[in-house]
């Protein structure tokens, strides 16, 4: 059974008089353990689609089903609860809470989940170790490089044991070497823990790493191939 | 036990407060300053009221007086207490009465060798007057009236002495009307000059022994006032009630009334009330300014952090939790400001409480009630905390509005906010 199902999703944005069809009857399904990239030109609807899958935005028509839960049947706070427990997010930049150290940022999601303090710290430190940031655990985001910040964000997204991790252009602000380092970490997580990753990207390298590539154009799926 | 979650939220709030130290210090400074000013002002006001009440009561009226009905309004010297003895006996049995004395007053012409002025002649009991009023301590030159009965000595106000151009030992001629309507005249020798600081009192009062007064003005044993001090201001009402009851059993009692200091100096409470109201208006303006500074800080902070709130909500932080975080932040800022304000405000006020504030430039209205020379602010629990608590309540109330705006925030909109 797929972990993510997108069924006939439409999304239209109105800006003044013009209506933008950001997503146009999208059907998509992802199996658990996927490592998929959504690519396409700017404005093609990548971010919108990820937001739909993440329950941050709701479709005008159609439904999204994550981990067996139908978004159309859930209210705002149920969606928030689902995001907290089943979905990890990595955004393009400014992912982290500035006043918290690296390890506290990773702990924060577990705090929201109600995990005990001692367990929180242990799991957060172990996670930082996996992304290779043990030494930087006490640094605030401002004291970390862009790549290090993204690695903390990945650690935070994964530490809560989500069903899927959604990453909207995670490498866009990184140079290619740092970007590749981040990708390798995510690929490792995918292999070792069987976490499902869905990226949006412009980045050729990310597309190469992905096991499946979904191409969007004008809010429609142009191509969908697995390797 | 506090849950660890609360601790983490508080920790975040505390760090957020210090993210922009300059802005925080400005806000904290405004809160602190408002508290300081409020503490000082309130202490100063209370201190000056106490001075006003004390100087009026202690120099002049006492806490309570028994008079003949109508005497207070008409000052007709024929409205007397004919036989004060039984009344005084009754009063002296009341537990909360500290001291008591009698007085008689009339208006007469007072002449020195080369000048004549009108003055209030006050007959006092040299033995008991010092127990009731501060007159004896106000003597600046010479000495108080001797206790032996029937002396023809007099105490004169400093301004009246200056106007009459007299010094200690000079003789004054008093010319007035006796109780029976006949001419009353006498010669007295100045034995002391007093200065109360209340100009009206110093300019037109002359004190002579009550026995002399009664003889000169044909009063027999009669007096105009029995002046009573209770143990404290709080006992006044109880004592008044007992005297009213006691008067019912005295033959002359029906013609007598009891008045407290509030009635004896009606302008005083009014002056205090006016001053207090203008003070309160000023405080509200001050607190309003602080409230706007808080509001501004918070709106700015929230505007700047909208993206951050969006990310936090996206990863599962509930709006309620964000509101709580923001309310912690405003509370922390307020606590720091109010705390510093109380410490510094009490320190400064305490200093002035010891050294006093020079009020020689006080307005005429204040001078009338004895405000001149030095005023000592009076720090108390009320004056130390009333202002800061007001500041606290208002700032927390104001901080609520921006915090509640968060509840309407949608994560995506917040994250695309720049
Ligand atoms: N909140 C919004 N209001 C109006 N139009 C929007 C909104 N969000 C997205 N759009 C429009 O929807 C379309 C899809 O936007 P989306 O952000 O999903 O594209 P994208 O593929 O992520 O682009 P990019 O590669 O530039 O990030 C665009 O035409 C965009 O202008
Ligand atoms: Mg995008």
Image (spheres, coloured by chain):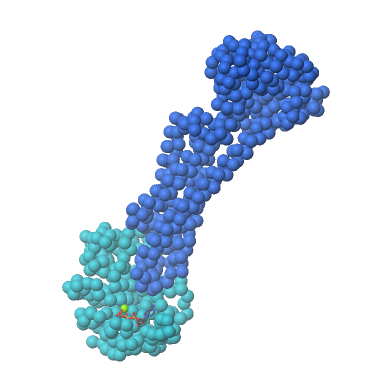
Chain colours: A cyan, B blue
B315 relative position to B288: left or right: left
Residue B401 vs B384, above or below: the answer is: below
Q: Is residue B3 visible?
A: no
- Residue B173 as seen in the image, left or right of residue A81: right
In which image quadrant can residue B188 be found?
A: top right
Out of A120 and B136, give the one closest to the viewer: B136
The answer to whether residue B355 of the structure is visible from this angle is yes
Q: Residue A84 placed where, x, y %?
A: 39, 70
Name the residue at 74% across, 29% down: B74
Indicate the quadrant containing the C terminus of chain B: top left, top right, bottom left or bottom right.
bottom left
Residue B363: image x %, image y %?
A: 53, 35
Q: Residue furthest right?
A: B251
Total of numbered circles in the picture?
A: 0
Q: Tell me where residue B237 appears, x and y as whole percent.
A: 68, 33
Q: Residue furthest left?
A: A177
Q: Which residue is at 64% across, 36% downward?
A: B267
Whether residue A52 sits left or right of residue B132 in the image: it is left
Quadrant containing ligand 1: bottom left
Q: Residue at x 46, y 43 (%)?
A: B37
């Amino acid at each position: 059974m797929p972990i993510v199902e997108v069924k006939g999703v439409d999304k239209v944005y109105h800006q003044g008089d013009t209506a933008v069809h950001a997503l146009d009857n999208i059907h998509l399904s992802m199996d658990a353990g996927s490592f998929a990239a959504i690519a396409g030109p700017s404005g093609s609807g990548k971010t919108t689609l990820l937001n739909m899958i993440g329950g941050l935005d709701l479709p005008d028509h159609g439904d999204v089903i994550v981990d067996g839960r139908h978004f159309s049947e859930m209210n705002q706070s149920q969606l928030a609860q689902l995001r907290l427990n089943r979905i990890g997010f990595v955004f393009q930049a400014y992912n982290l809470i500035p006043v918290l150290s690296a390890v506290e940022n990773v702990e924060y999601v577990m705090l929201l989940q109600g995990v005990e303090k001692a367990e929180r710290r242990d799991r957060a430190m172990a996670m930082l170790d996996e992304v290779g940031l043990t030494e930087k655990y006490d640094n605030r985001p401002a004291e970390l490089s862009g790549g290090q910040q993204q690695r903390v964000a990945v650690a935070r997204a994964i530490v809560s044991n989500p069903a899927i991790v959604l990453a909207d252009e995670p490498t866009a602000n990184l140079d290619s070497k740092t970007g590749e380092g981040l990708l390798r970490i995510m690929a490792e997580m995918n292999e070792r823990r069987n976490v499902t990753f869905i990226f949006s990207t412009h980045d050729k390298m990310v597309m190469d790493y992905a096991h499946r590539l979904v191409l969007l154009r004008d809010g429609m799926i142009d191509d969908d191939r697995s390797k | 036990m506090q849950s660890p979650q609360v601790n983490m939220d508080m920790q975040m709030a505390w760090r957020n407060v210090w993210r922009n130290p300059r802005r925080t210090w400005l806000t904290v400074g405004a809160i602190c300053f408002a508290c300081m000013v409020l503490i000082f002002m309130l202490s100063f006001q209370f201190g000056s009221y106490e001075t006003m009440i004390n100087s009026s009561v202690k120099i002049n009226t006492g806490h309570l007086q028994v008079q003949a009905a109508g005497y207070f309004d008409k000052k007709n010297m024929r409205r007397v207490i004919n036989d004060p003895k039984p009344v005084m006996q009754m009063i002296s049995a009341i537990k909360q009465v500290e001291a008591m004395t009698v007085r008689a007053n009339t208006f007469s012409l007072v002449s020195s060798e080369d000048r004549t002025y009108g003055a209030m002649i006050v007959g006092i009991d040299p033995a008991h007057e010092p127990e009731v009023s501060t007159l004896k301590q106000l003597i600046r030159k010479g000495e108080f009236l001797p206790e032996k009965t029937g002396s023809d000595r007099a105490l004169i106000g400093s301004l009246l002495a200056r106007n009459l151009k007299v010094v200690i030992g000079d003789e004054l001629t008093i010319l007035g009307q006796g109780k029976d309507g006949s001419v009353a005249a006498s010669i007295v020798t100045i034995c002391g000059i007093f200065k109360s600081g209340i100009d009206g009192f110093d300019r037109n009062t002359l004190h002579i022994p009550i026995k002399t007064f009664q003889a000169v003005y044909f009063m027999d044993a009669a007096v105009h006032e029995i002046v009573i001090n209770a143990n404290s201001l709080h006992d006044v009402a109880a004592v008044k009630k007992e005297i009213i009851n006691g008067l019912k059993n005295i033959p002359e009692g029906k013609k007598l009334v009891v008045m407290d200091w509030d009635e004896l100096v009606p302008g005083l409470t009014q002056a205090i009330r006016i001053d207090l109201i203008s003070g309160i208006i000023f405080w509200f303006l001050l607190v309003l300014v602080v409230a706007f500074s808080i509001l501004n800080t918070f709106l700015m902070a929230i505007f700047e952090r909208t993206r951050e709130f969006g990310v936090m909500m996206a990863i599962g932080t509930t709006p309620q939790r964000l509101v709580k975080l923001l309310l912690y932040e405003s509370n922390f800022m307020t606590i720091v400001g109010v705390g510093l304000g109380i410490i510094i405000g009490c320190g400064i006020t305490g200093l002035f409480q010891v050294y006093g504030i020079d009020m020689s430039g006080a307005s005429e209205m204040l001078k009338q009630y004895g405000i001149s020379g030095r005023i000592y602010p009076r720090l108390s629990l009320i004056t130390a905390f009333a202002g800061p608590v007001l500041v606290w309540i208002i700032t927390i109330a104001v901080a609520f509005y921006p915090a509640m705006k968060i509840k309407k925030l949608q994560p995506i909109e917040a994250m695309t906010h720049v």
